[in-house]
């Protein structure tokens, strides 16, 4: 079973989160992100940065203690790690680094083009919508752990509330209506899209978003105009917070309350490229009916 070894290791670790759980959760809810350091990180034990997806099994076996500790921190924080059908071949941890033959993609395996502001897995139901009984929901959290940094290459965050504060009431109203098409991100093995959904949803006074600069389309001229306005505002660099990640540092952020970006760079494919590890998290354990194979894995969510 994929992930079995690192899940076993995670179950044996109880001090991977370097702060009290209540402090972590409060900071995450209040500020929409938390920067923290993984105690079990040892730079000298890392393999080279993988350059092909086929290397993942080898890397995971060599760095299994690190992977297990990374998962353990999520469990300690009360977050349930998940992976989605059709993405990352069932592995809970994704390697965010340039991969050969994928370097021109707008995805976590890309590098050569700017990855503009987006929410991950936006084609799935978001907070405030009626969740599917059968399909997994859009991830609540996304964590990036830095293994190797690259000078001048940043992951940046935008707070949704700041973006919405710069939109007109009319634009907000249109973005809240089911007038948009969302294309499944390029990291998935098969293409899909969902039609007739809103870009933003308000639940009990809090805004949530499925905005994806690259994969969102309006179904009417008014919808496309509102979307273009949001695209324009999200490219205001004054709204971007460049997350200061050194090797061993991680950032956990609310996927639907923020947007994240990465600027372009030229990969070397020599084992020293920028390398982060990504984990999706849910605040609540998924329903058994949302799992792809509930008899063998409690973390693999159905998307089809």
Image (spheres, rainbow, N blue to C red):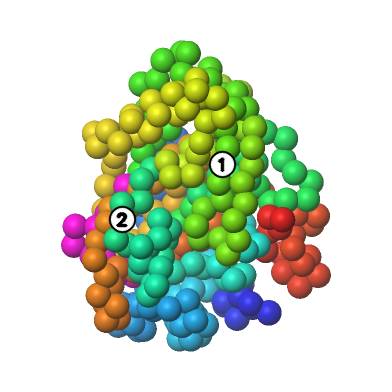
Q: Residues within 10 Å of mark 1 (few under 14, many from 20)?
A: many
User: For the point 35% across and 34% down, which residue is it?
Assistant: 234
The answer to whether residue 68 shows anywhere in this view is yes
Residue 269: x and y in percent read 29, 78
Q: Horizontal placement of 161 versus 21: left or right?
A: left
Tally the numbered discs.
Answer: 2
In the picture, the quarter occupied by the C terminus is bottom right
- Frontmost residue, 151 versus 224: 224
State which tag comes first along the sequence, 2 or 1.
2
Q: Residues within 10 Å of mark 2 (few under 14, many from 20)?
A: some
Residue 93: x and y in percent read 51, 68
- Frontmost residue, 28 versus 204: 204
Residue 161: x and y in percent read 42, 28
Q: Horizontal placement of 213 versus 285: left or right?
A: left
Identify the magenta region: 145-156
The quarter holding residue 157 reads top left
Disc number placed over residue 130 in the picture, else none: none
Tell me the residue that label 2 is attached to: 113
Q: Residue furthest left?
A: 151
In the picture, the quarter occupied by the N terminus is bottom right
The answer to whether residue 23 shows anywhere in this view is no
Disc number placed over residue 182 in the picture, else none: 1
Considering the numbered disc 1 on the image, is that residue within a helix, a strand or a loop?
strand
């Amino acid at each position: 079973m994929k992930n079995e070894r690192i899940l076993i290791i995670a179950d044996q670790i109880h001090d991977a989160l370097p702060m009290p759980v209540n402090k972590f959760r409060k900071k995450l809810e209040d500020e929409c992100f938390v920067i923290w350091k993984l105690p079990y990180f040892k730079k000298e034990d890392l393999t080279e940065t993988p350059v092909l997806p086929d290397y993942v099994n080898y890397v995971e076996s060599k760095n299994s203690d690190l992977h297990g500790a990374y998962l353990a921190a999520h469990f300690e924080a009360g977050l349930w790690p998940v992976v989605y059908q059709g993405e990352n071949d069932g592995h809970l941890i994704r390697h965010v680094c340039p991969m050969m033959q994928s370097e021109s993609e707008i995805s976590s395996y890309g590098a050569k083009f700017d990855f503009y502001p987006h929410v991950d897995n936006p084609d799935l139901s978001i907070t405030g919508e009626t969740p599917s009984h059968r399909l997994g929901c859009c991830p609540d959290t996304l964590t990036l752990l830095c293994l190797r940094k690259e000078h001048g290459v940043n992951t940046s965050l935008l707070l949704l509330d700041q973006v919405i504060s710069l939109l007109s009431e009319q634009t907000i109203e249109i973005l809240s209506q089911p007038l948009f098409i969302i294309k499944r991100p390029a990291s998935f093995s098969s293409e899909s899209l969902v039609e007739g959904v809103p870009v933003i949803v308000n639940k009990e006074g809090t805004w949530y978003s499925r905005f994806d600069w690259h994969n969102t389309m309006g179904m009417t001229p008014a919808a496309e105009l509102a979307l273009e306005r949001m695209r324009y505002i999200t490219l205001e660099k004054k709204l971007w917070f460049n997350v200061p990640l050194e090797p061993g540092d991680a950032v956990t952020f609310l996927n639907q309350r923020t947007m994240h970006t990465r600027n372009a760079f030229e990969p070397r494919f020599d084992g020293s490229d920028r390398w982060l590890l990504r984990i999706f998290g849910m605040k609540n354990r998924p329903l058994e009916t949302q799992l792809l194979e509930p008899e063998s894995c409690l973390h693999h969510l159905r998307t089809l």
